Amino acid sequence: MIDIIKNILNEKKALDIAFFDLLKKNYIVDVVVLCTSLNEKHALSLVDSLKKGIKQYDEELLRIDDGDGWIAIDMGDKLIHIMTKEFRQKYDMDQFLKDFGNKEK
């Protein structure tokens, strides 16, 4: 499923896509995905593409929290964060997750 998510985000021009494997780190999810959107409209388009793209694999987005500049998507064992560049820099989740787990690109 990670490759499918990666392909969808790449096809829809998400920027700086990063995957963090936290399976062995006793975290709330196995994988965290971070990506940057061009703007909020682009972020909503990414969410819509993810919904449609994973449906054919009997996966679903369990919960979507849409905030100003940041969308968090719960897929059960995966968590996807779509952020504007400003939010991604401000909260620096990349560094937190890099320190916490193993980064894969």
Image (spheres, rainbow, N blue to C red):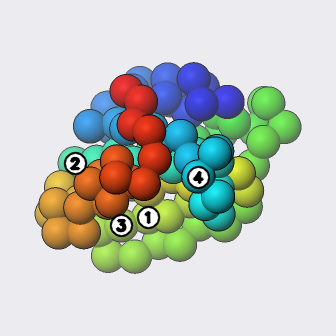
- Tag 2: Cα neighbours inside 10 Å, few (<14), some, or many (≥20)? some
Q: Disc 1 designates what residue?
A: 71
Counting residues from the N terminus, which is met first, the one under dot 4 or under dot 3?
4
Q: Is residue 92 above or below residue 48?
A: below
Task: Give x and y (percent) for residue 40.
Answer: 30, 61
Q: CA distance from mark 2 to mark 3?
A: 12 Å
> In front of the other: label 2 or label 3?
3
Q: Disc 4 designates what residue?
A: 25
Q: CA distance from mark 2 to mark 4?
A: 31 Å
Query: Of helix, strand and loop, which one carries label 3?
Result: strand
Task: Give x and y (percent) for residue 43.
Answer: 37, 53
> In front of the other: label 1 or label 4?
4
- Tag 3: Cα neighbours inside 10 Å, few (<14), some, or many (≥20)? many
Residue 6 seen by the camera: yes
Q: Is residue 78 above or below residue 103?
A: below
Amino acid type assigned to the residue bearing label 2 in the image: Leu
> In front of the other: label 4 or label 3?
4
The residue at 73%/56% (across/down) is 76
| Residue 24, quarter of the rendered image | top right
> In front of the other: label 2 or label 1?
1
Residue 78 seen by the camera: no
The residue at 17%/69% (across/down) is 90
For residue 70, the mark is 3
The residue at 31%/32% (across/down) is 13
Counting residues from the N terminus, which is met first, the one under dot 1 or under dot 4?
4
Counting residues from the N terminus, which is met first, the one under dot 2 or under dot 4?
4
Task: Give x and y (percent) for residue 103.
Answer: 39, 37
State if disc 3 and disc 2 touch (CB < 8 Å). Answer: no
Query: Of helix, strand and loop, which one carries label 1?
Result: strand
Quadrant, the N terminus: top right
For residue 38, the mark is 2
- Relative horizontal placement of residue 45, taking residue 65 as reference (left or right): left
